[in-house]
């Protein structure tokens, strides 16, 4: 329904792959955080995007996942590692902004998918 939800699903897939692509798979707290949050984000955002979910609750859940990504380097203790820190921070900001944007839209404001 909203392109923003599809983008969040893609960002979820990136989170799953990023520990291996960016080379921090050896840092278990950062790697597992990315994999778990990435799976949940990809599933929820993909479901919201494909099922035309009327409720804003799953969209706000994606927002919470984005906020978690922002703070998780400090909570899980990998804020001193620049690559996973910046990956989580930037993806977290993007996810939170995109999710808040779609959650705050009324159905009348929804962009129409052209196909």
Image (tube, helix red, strand yellow):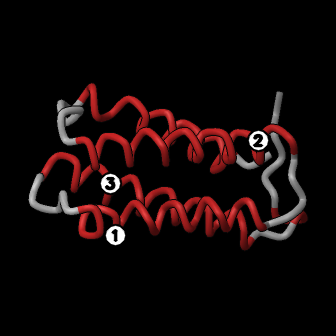
Q: Specify the label residue 47 is tagged with.
A: 2
Q: Residue furthest front?
A: 28
Residue shown at 44% from the left, 65% from the top: 68
Taking the image as shown, residue 87 lies to the left or right of residue 101, namely: left
Say above or below: 90 vs 34: below
The residue beneath circle 1 is 71
Q: Quote the CA–CA distance across marks 3 and 2.
A: 22 Å
Q: Nearer the viewer, mark 2 or mark 1?
A: 1
Tell me where residue 76 appears, x and y as whole percent.
Answer: 27, 62
Q: Residues within 10 Å of mark 3 (few under 14, many from 20)?
A: many
Q: Which is nearer the N-term, disc 1 or disc 3?
A: 1
The residue beneath circle 3 is 88
Viewport quadrant of the C terminus: top right
Viewport quadrant of the N terminus: top right
Between 94 and 92, the one nearer to me in the picture: 92
Q: Do the numbered discs 2 and 1 sit on residues whose CB atoms are within 8 Å?
A: no
Residue shown at 90% from the left, 65% from the top: 108
Say above or below: 86 vs 100: above
């Amino acid at each position: 329904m909203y392109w923003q939800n599809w983008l969040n699903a893609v960002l979820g897939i990136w989170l799953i792959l990023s520990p291996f692509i960016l080379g921090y798979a050896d840092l278990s707290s950062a790697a597992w955080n990315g994999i778990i949050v990435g799976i949940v984000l990809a599933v929820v955002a993909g479901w919201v995007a494909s099922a035309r979910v009327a409720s804003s609750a799953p969209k706000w859940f994606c927002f919470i996942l984005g906020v978690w990504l922002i703070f998780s380097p400090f909570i899980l203790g990998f804020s001193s590692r620049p690559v996973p820190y910046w990956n989580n921070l930037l993806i977290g900001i993007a996810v939170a902004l995109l999710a808040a944007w779609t959650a705050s839209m009324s159905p009348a404001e929804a962009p129409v998918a052209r196909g």
